[in-house]
Amino acid sequence: MRARMKDFFRYRYLLWELVKKGIKLKYRRSYLGILWSLVEPLLTMIVLTVVFGTLFGHDEKSFAVYVLSGRLLYTFFSQSTNAALRSIRGNSGMIKKVYVPKYLYPLSGVLFNYVIFLLSLVVLVAVSLALGVMPSVYTFQAIVPLLLLLVFSFGVGMILATVGVFFRDMEYLWGVILMLVMYTCAIFYYPERLLNSGKKGWLLKLNPLYCLIACFRDAVFGRAMNPKMLLFAGGSSLVVLVVGVWVFYKKQDEFILHI
Amino acid sequence: MGKEVIKVDHVSMKFNLSREKIDSMKEYFIKFMRREIKYDEFWALKDINFSMQKGERLGILGLNGAGKSTLLKVIAGVFKPTEGSVTRHGVIAPMLELGAGFDMQYTGAENIFLYGALLGYRREFIEEKYDEIVAFSELGKFIDVPLKNYSSGMRARLGFAIATVVEPDILILDEVLSVGDAKFRRKSERKVMDMFDTGVTVLFVSHALEQIERLCNKAMILEHGQMIAYGDIAEVAAKYREIVS
């Protein structure tokens, strides 16, 4: 354990360089550059609000905040897990030549997306204030789901990174699974009807990402969080993290033979 | 006799060459259920045993596919040996296929920091040595151009410049002294010679026997993953000449 910590300390420059590379290259050669991390969620929010707001008749102003908060968290999850999934194959050039701890690759993939995600939260703050969703003491709760989201995404990312080395199909399959996750996250609809119908409510409740989004929204809209959901989200994040790290460590020495 | 820096203890390395490439999950499951997954076992290294003292310079000879590069990668820690173990003491500068860790979209300058971090250098150290690296690589104003626009010689020069800026205890060279044009080749050989003077331990793979005779004081011959000769450069080189001719 001590040696691990020393290792981590030794390689923090590399982790930092990899995170920086991810951020720098994401928007390189586009005119707006890093500003896209603000513009893109704003534009998708407008589209989703217009489409689903008119379709389902949600014409209250705060619907935009509702959509945006869900969409931001989901986008981070999908992009960071995708980055982690491709991280081993994508960095095969480095892995084959120099020994560094391999978890740095999925970790940096998740972290650089997290930095971009935190930056794009600025849009949420601005939109909330503009539409009259004011901060309160409950707003500080947001830090809990935000941290859990990072843990959860990293855990899922470690599992995917491992599986992705042995089965290339995962890259395509994960895209489909993500779609399912998205539709069971209640990003652009209110889940009450589904939850209260009793029958299919479990579809949402068993989705840790939905629980995280729900807790985050509670914080944004100034309500206390649902303790059951918070517990489930926290528990599943921890389980996923442990499983992810375990699987990765178990298999990492074989990576090199498959990339 | 100096201090022991590398010990390679009964190292064997096995690869599974799948006869047909199984890359998709469906195929894997079908074959797994039918127990049809067969591998051709291939031992790239078999029971390699030797140790090196500080300041020794070992040339590794062998035909293509003899396991030379695999051995270097095992010693560098990239491959974990299937059997046996490797112990190393000190800072290693691995120069295996120079510049392979580069990012093509990054500029030369950005790659210096990325590659330096990959080799475990500290940021201040790279900043301090930055000018030296740029000067040695002779890239001039190309240093701010994305790497995808470099020629392969330019990439190799940059890789060489970064990798040799440290003062390592162990230097692993895989055919790297054949990069660039004749002028750069002379310059890089001189640089490596300078490093030799500091008492570095060297592992060197090359197909140019004269180069190995000039640079090394010990040598080994690998054949089909087995060490068939180990000893002083003169006698091993003579034996290798016999094999080749």
Image (spheres, rainbow, N blue to C red):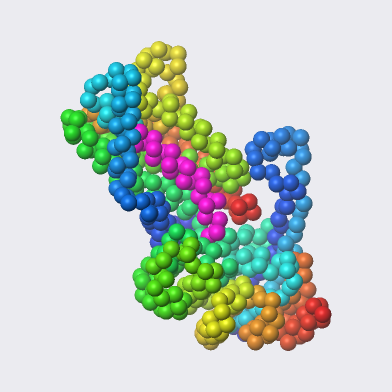
Magenta span of residues:
A71-95
Q: Residue at x 66, y 76 (%)?
A: B206
Quadrant position of the C terminus of chain B in the picture: bottom right
Within the magenta stretch, is there residue A51? no
Label count reads 0
Measured as percent of width and height from the top left, residue B25 is found at: 64, 38
Q: Quadrant of residue B121?
A: bottom left
Q: Residue at x 45, y 22 (%)?
A: A203
Q: Quadrant of residue A202?
A: top left
Measured as percent of width and height from the top left, residue B19 is found at: 76, 48
Quadrant position of the N terminus of chain B in the picture: bottom right
Say if A242 sits above or below A70 in the image.
below
Measured as percent of width and height from the top left, residue A204 is found at: 42, 23
Q: Quadrant of residue B129?
A: bottom left
Measured as percent of width and height from the top left, residue B205 is found at: 65, 74
Residue A193 versus residue A103: which sits nearer the camera?
Answer: A193
Q: Main secondary structure of the magenta part?
A: helix
Q: Is residue B92 visible?
A: no
Within the magenta stretch, is there residue A94? yes
Q: Residue at x 73, y 52 (%)?
A: B17
Residue B238 versus residue A56: which sits nearer the camera?
Answer: A56
Q: Is residue B93 left or right of residue B49?
A: left
Say if A64 sits above or below B193 in the image.
above
Q: Is residue B96 left or right of residue A184?
A: right
Residue B222 versus residue B162: which sits nearer the camera?
Answer: B162
Q: Residue at x 55, y 49 (%)?
A: A249
Q: Is residue B82 left or right of residue A171?
A: right
Q: Is residue A16 visible?
A: yes
